Image (cartoon, rainbow, N blue to C red):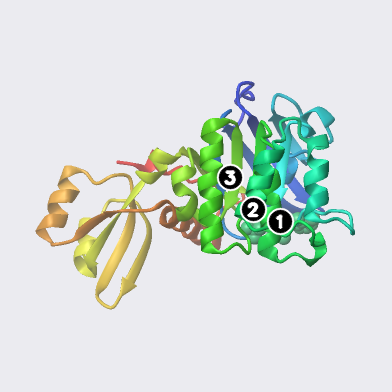
Amino acid sequence: MPSGQPLDPGAAVSVRGLRKSFGRKDILHGLDFDIPTDSIVGLLGRNGAGKTTALSILSGQDPATAGAVSVLGRHPFEDPTTAARLCFARENQKYPESFKAAHVLKSAPWFFEHWDQGFAERLVRMFRLPVETKIQKLSRGQLSAVAIVVGLAARAPLTFFDEPYLGLDATARQLFYDVMLQDYLEHPRTIVMSTHLIDEAADLLEKVLVIDDGRILMDADADSARSAAFSLSGPAAAVGQVSAGWTAMNERRIGGLASVTLAGQPDAALTAAAAAHHLEIGPVGLQDLVAAIGSRSTDTLGASAPATDTAVDTSEEQR
Ligand SMILES: Nc1ncnc2c1ncn2[C@@H]1O[C@H](COP(=O)(O)OP(=O)(O)OP(=O)(O)O)[C@@H](O)[C@H]1O
């Protein structure tokens, strides 16, 4: 999305030119994106990409250094009206020292207008959360479970989950995805989830925002993201020949074999050439696509690209 467009008043979240610096360190370099109302959106990116920083600003906990931010139609920073309508669920949430999960559940209805106590209690049983243990004594997975219970049972119009799976085992993570989807279908609302475990969550996401080094590298609906690239594999020489002229997002080599991720979708000429050389054409999962975009941007940054926005919009590179 080109910078300079007005904020979208119909979106749950709309930001233009969002910048954040800590001291002299620039963390977010002018983000532009919209999050549609009543959708599940993935905020994807590598460690240190700026996801938590962005979520802290959107949830009103931190001020932006520059740029325009609209959350549920208002400027969120320290705005009680916005705060009452959103929930920022994260495992490292601070609670009073003596608090147990039971206290969290008891106080939640004061903060969340749509809080569903029966649903919260069901979630507590599902995630086997020991509600009478002090929060300070809970394991990391149990802290994530507290965040999940609050994030889901709050049924806030806008929910941010910041890596909601930390410490959770695979069964609990799947349970979270299943129950979130089911509850979202019954009670549509806007959910933004930052995650590294992209393939696990991919089926839930309607839109993906890929952020790296404080820049948006991809902003696409999940279906177009899934068809943004494909892989071509086989003997390295033939792969190189057939993929000539295509945008290679990354390449892996093992011995004489190569697999490249190419932007776009295979056309008839490439399909025919691949068949003639016995090469394999395959889909690229969202996780691999994000990794390819990330490694490409790292290459670009490593080559001392100018410090201006270097957003890679893969859709523009499709042939
Ligand atoms: N208060 C702060 N002061 C200085 N630098 C900060 C501060 N908070 C975050 N940063 C830096 O901002 C960058 C982005 O951090 P952020 O936590 O937003 O990344 P992230 O995408 O959430 O990463 P992860 O997936 O590892 O949690 C990092 O380089 C981090 O060190």
- The residue at which mark 1 appears reads as 91
Residue 229: give x, y in percent of width and height: 35, 49
The CA distance from mark 1 to mark 2 is 18 Å
* Mark 1 or mark 2: whose residue is earlier in sequence: 1
Q: Secondary structure at mark 3?
A: loop
- The residue at which mark 3 appears reads as 309
Mark 3: which amino acid? Asp
Q: Nearer the viewer, residue 293 or 181?
A: 181
Q: Secondary structure at mark 1?
A: loop
Query: Which quadrant of the rendered structure holds the C terminus?
Result: top left
Q: Quadrant of ligand 1?
A: bottom right
Against 187, residue 29 (above or below) is below
Of circles 3 and 2, the one toward us is 2
- The residue at which mark 2 appears reads as 125
* Mark 3 or mark 2: whose residue is earlier in sequence: 2
CB contact under 8 Å: marks 1 and 2: no
